Amino acid sequence: MGEKDLKASDSRILECFPAARGCRSRWRWNPFWLLLRFPTAVSFLIVSILAAGLIGFAYFSLVVSSFLPDPAAIGCRPDSEGSWSIGIYYGKSPFSLSPIELGNTLYLFFETKSTSTMQGDIGVARSADQGATWEFLGIALDEKWHLSYPFVFGYDHQIYMMPEGSKNGELQLYRATRFPLEWTLEKVLIRKPLVDASLFQYEGYYWLFASDFSWFGTEKNGELEIWYSSSPLGPWKQHRRNPIYRGDRSLGTRNGGRPFIYEGSLYRLAQDCGGTYGQRIRAYKVEKLSKEEFREVPVKLGIKESKKGRNAWNGIRYHHLDAQQLPSGDWIAVMDGDRVPSGHTAWRFLLGCTFVLLLFLQVMLMGFLVGAINCIVPPSCCMAVSRRNEPCWFWTRPQFNLKARKHSSVMNRYGSSIRGRANIKTCCGKLVLCLLAFVGGILVCMAVHFLFGGNGAEEAYVYRGQYSQFTMLTMTYEARLWNLKLYIKHYSRCASVREIVIVWNKGNPPIPDEFDSAVPVRIRVEELNSLNNRFKVDPLIRTRAVLELDDDIMMTCNDIEKGFMVWREHPERIVGFYPRLVDGSPLKYRNDKYARGKNGYNVILTGAAFMDSEYAFKKYWSEEAREGRDFVDESFNCEDLLLNFLYANASSKRTVEYVHPAWAIDTSKLSTAAISRNTQMHYKIRTTCLSKFSKMYGLLQQKWDFGSRKDGWDVNALVAETERPNWWERNAGPNMIDIHSMQEFSHELSQAGDRLVIVEFYGTWCASCRALFPKLCKTAAENPDILFIKVNFDENKSMCKQLNIKVLPYFHFYRGADGQLESFSCNLAKFQKIRDAIAKHHTARCSMGPAVGVGDRNIKTRFPEEKPAEASSR
């Protein structure tokens, strides 16, 4: 490129990015110079940041916040090394251990990290019920350096502790002066930075397995040394073959717990640190141990690994196991575990920053394509001189100056060519922009996920310092098998799920091995296809809490854990995720939007609810519920409503509580196997159930308000504001009612006496009906002595046919003995027609008896399906 061409190129670049003049004068710096010189570019960046912020906030609210731990929760907090937990195991042998479920006093010593010093101390807890519950006693040992791996043993009527303190460069021994909280330094055993030192007696000698932590790289967790002595107090001598291992961390060289003797053989526990520090525990059988020789072979440990991944307390790694034999002959063991790998916090932060950088580059690319940013690289930045004619330091070096200008001009020339080809006014250009915007949204979500998403686990909630488990129960049949497989794969990974019970109502049952499950799956085959089977008493259920959850509902494990937590607070209640409000006279079944519009509920659908399996199932199958169960079989519906009635009328206290899920997906919409696809008919049947059950068991309890919980788990502000009743469900007051059958219609007319009754026939799909409805409500409010009756055409087709309704909206006027006064169709433009009719017929006079004009007709109860009436356009 010649000098002339280079100067011309520089001139064009200066015009497209005049920011170079920004360093011209340090005395007149304007903080808004970017906005003044590049209003389009700055505006584009501001809009992009706002859009990214909205997407990130929505993703955080709907997804990330659903599995973040409660910031107010008391307990261990994660750090760069993870968040370790401790589990207690029992078994007949050290190779058949299982987690305990239930009185000797046990003491547990463990590493606990101080949040003030960020170094490990030795804590101690006590259990008086074989490890079922624990009481934290305090810090047993605190030094100026990091402490861990508290190896406690007894010798010569004294209790000793040999913790790992490699930061001090020595292996020290402490003696208990006042067990378990007061200890004194007894002596230094070995002046070497040994970690995870384990001591045991075998064939006349005391042996010590440990690892030298002064090595670097792969050898740091891949080294094992053996020491021996005639006394645990020393002196200690090195094994002839030291170091026994060095180099391969995955072989299990570093100690993973107390060695033990079982059936005459010595076993060593070791850490597999191949993938990450403390990935899992390996077990080795020691075949030869002497002063000169050491030989061991791997054996199967026998502890079943969890398939719940991060949702399990030891789902990702566990690296220490201390097994000891009890006086009873059984074995007890404690094992630590973590749900994230080592260095997880730093790794997530690095990934989050990477996605932020990619997002910035993607925004710049979009800005360049739409023309908001005119060039890619500003080669003339700071090329101009300052007020004192002092050139910027970078441009005083020709080797940088010329090369930078040359390369930037080439990049901008190619960039201009690309923008010219990617014409955003064409369909292809618009498609490219949409694709880039979609990629940008994904980058925002990924950045939020890694920067603010915690460890990504959906953990169980602690209640009164304890965790618990529940059984999931779902009822299904062969046509919904694909739903069931997805259901089991997802929910079996939830932290507190112990077992999944499938109530198989119809068809050939599957084999439990067909399912990808992290917990046991039991299939209970029923002889009769009945909805009552959902609440059948099952003696094989081993938990008090049962979650009844339909197989077509998918929600987060965290929402399930929240519901379980609320139920543990109030086990006498039905705690669930789908609220309903049943009120009115007569009672009518409506969806959750109606409950939110009224800001209250008194029913929880048991298709997604926690309950006490003993109380609920026995109550449902009691003699008093027999009539209700028979009606459930007759209608093949309403088993959940029956249980709500039974609960409500067995107690004067609150019996239901709602928990709002972050999100829920109904997978039945994706298949043809939905049980109640006809919503209108489904609601009509359930309205009939309400009428039946209220006569059998009495009315439901009072309405309970949303938002009554301090933690806010029972309300979602966004949903509460936006989910209002449908327009046809809003009534002006007590003088505007809905009817659902000819019997209700006749009843209301007969009870009206001499009142003027205006009946509106409408359709939910009718635009004219919707436009006219607000004025009708206003008229009803202005005339409280007139009864307004609303009739939904789609729910009452046979009745509308009998009354010759062919166009919507349509109005009937009734009054006392005069019966039907007049009828006509009307729309918003002709609403004066209704006012005139009211003025004509709404006059004071003496009562002349009940209305006529309906009862004298020959009304049939069933008619064939008719096409929807036409919406009036007049």
Image (spheres, rainbow, N blue to C red):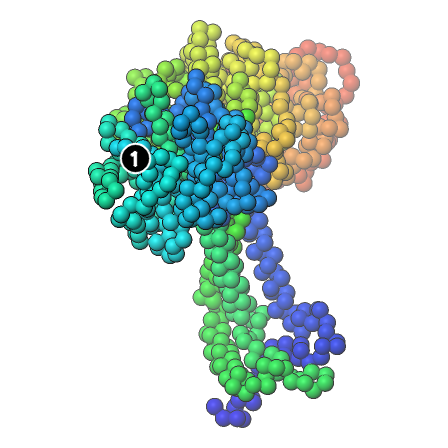
Residue drawn at (51%, 35%), measured in percent from left and top?
184
Give left or right: position of 193 versus 739: left
What residue lies at 58% left-to-right and 39% top-to-bottom?
71
Between residue 464 and residue 819, name the one nearer to us: 464
**Residue occupying the point 60% across, 79% down:** 381
Q: Is residue 397 visible?
A: yes
Nearest the viewer among 587 and 866 is: 587
Residue 461 is at least partly visible in this image: no
Q: Would you say 367 lies left or right of 298 here? A: right
Judged left or right of residue 269, residue 858 is: right
Q: Which quadrant holds the C terminus?
A: top right
Residue 529: quadrant of the picture: top left
Tell me residue 679's x, y (percent). 47, 30
- Quadrant location of residue 782? top right
- Residue at which label 1 appears: 205
Could you tell me residue 675's position as x and y percent?
A: 40, 28
Q: Pinpoint residue 585: horizontal percent, then vertical percent.
A: 61, 18
Depth check, front residue: 527 or 212: 212
Compared across the picture, whether 269 is left or right of 295 comes to right
* SS at mark 1 in the image: strand
Q: Please identify the residue farthest to the top as the structure is shown.
A: 623
Q: Position of residue 343 (x, y in %)?
A: 45, 50
The image quarter containing residue 780 is: top right
Three-letter code for the amino acid on which mark 1 is drawn: Tyr
Q: Within 10 Å of the Cα at label 1, are there few (<14), some (14-19), or many (20+) other Cα atoms? A: some
* Residue displayed at 61% across by 40% down: 718
Q: Is residue 231 above or below residue 374?
A: above
Q: Which of 65 and 527 is in front in this view?
A: 65
* For residue 622, above or below residue 310: above
Total labels drawn: 1
